[in-house]
Image: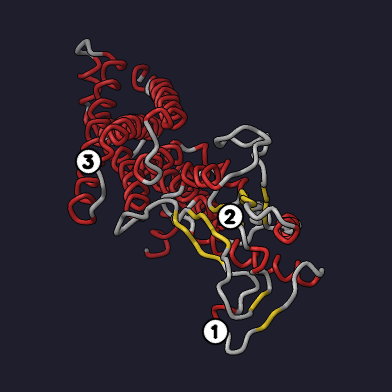
Amino acid sequence: MIGLLVRSAWVQLSRDRAAQVLSFIVPIVFFSVFAVIFGGGTTVDRTSRLRVPVVDESRTERSQALIRALEADSALRVNVVVPPDARGPGRAGEPFTRALAEEWVRRGNAAVALVLPVGIEWSIMSFAQGERVPAILLSDPSDPVASRLVGGLLQRAALRVAASGGADLQLGPGSPAERMMPVPFEEERVLGRKRQSPMIAFYAAGIAVMFIMFAAAGAGGALIEETESGTLERVLTSGLGMNGLLLAKWLSLTSFACAQIVVMFMWGMVAFRLPLLAHLPGFAVMTVTTAAAAAAFGLVLATLSRTRQQLSGLANLLVLGLNAIGGSMFPRFLMSETLQQISLVGFNAWALDGYLKVFWREAPLAALAPQVGALLGFTALFLFLARRFARRWETA
């Protein structure tokens, strides 16, 4: 009898293609997504070069030698002037100044910039007693890896300059350990300098976007329940029609998602001093557009699925997968450039970038145009797909 029941269970599974996909294909796809992001797979180039604007205020032979050594490093993409392919502020070919480099970091065009001040030429491999002029790393603390990487490669570049005869080694008696670096440097945070918890906005945006996607997918499943109970058929015959039904569902899901985001950010303001009131206009714009896209996304999953089990599997795969590559689980700045571009296929990556612009970079409303435009485009696409998938209920 036990063997018969086991055989019956396998026969049922062999006849249910959706169950087969959820049982075997979905775990493989989900594993592959995380393997590409966190693993050392060969399908994605994880050795992308870090763009570093360099400001040469010294303008000496030694500072130029140091820049050439940095340019020779395969891990860096050094820019002394604004590159023609860049989207940051400044004109192509314009030399970087300290203010321009700081603006690049502030707007997110570079995670770190390097300033070589006047007097740096005498600090390269000089350990004699006296004050050494340090290089300045203008950093975005949301990417803690970039500043440490550039700081370490700066030391290697200084050693190359010394080895090539670009600097003289001078040792002073009793030099402390912190003075034994080939070239001293100081890190200056461009963002988050006046905040006690500067990364709260970063975490709040990632968690908020992820959970409204889960909530919208779950709430959209009400369509499946209404189909099974016969409620959907009665609603369609009442004169409302499928267009009116989907519009009502979308508006209700959008309002729910807006309420979720507002509650989460208000808790962040009360408990973690998130500066919500100082960023209300940008917050309102991003919240409405993000909630609209998430609600439409939930409708697509609901109209595509035929059972609650299928909806649950699709939601787990797509929501977790999109948030993994979109920045909610793993910061996008630690991914390769290729994977960062791939992550933009999900609307959540655009939403997260928009929230970061509002709360972290304190960008004006006009700067949100790319993110808002992308979210509105995703919303229109999702609503179109949901309407197409819902035709099966009209012909049933």
- Badge 2 local density, few (<14 within 10 Å), some, or many (20+)? many
Q: Is residue 231 above or below residue 108?
A: above
Viewport quadrant of the C terminus: top left
Q: Residue at x 52, y 38 (%)?
A: 344
Q: Residue at x 22, y 10 (%)?
A: 239
Q: Is residue 129 above or below residue 82?
A: below
Residue 126's spot in the image, x, y percent?
Answer: 66, 75
Local SS, label 1: loop
Q: Amino acid at mark 2?
A: Val
Local SS, label 3: helix
Res. 208 visible in picture = yes
Which one is in front in this view, the residue at disc 1 or the one at disc 3?
1
Residue 121's spot in the image, x, y percent?
Answer: 67, 64
Q: Residue at x 58, y 70 (%)?
A: 132
191 and 121: which is toward the camera: 121
Q: Residue at x 25, y 25 (%)?
A: 251
Q: Alpha carbon of mark 2 to alpha carbon of mark 3: how far? A: 35 Å
Local SS, label 2: strand
Q: Which residue is tagged 3?
A: 277
Q: Which residue is tagged 2?
A: 115
165 and 36: which is toward the camera: 165
Viewport quadrant of the N terminus: bottom left
142 and 224: which is toward the camera: 142
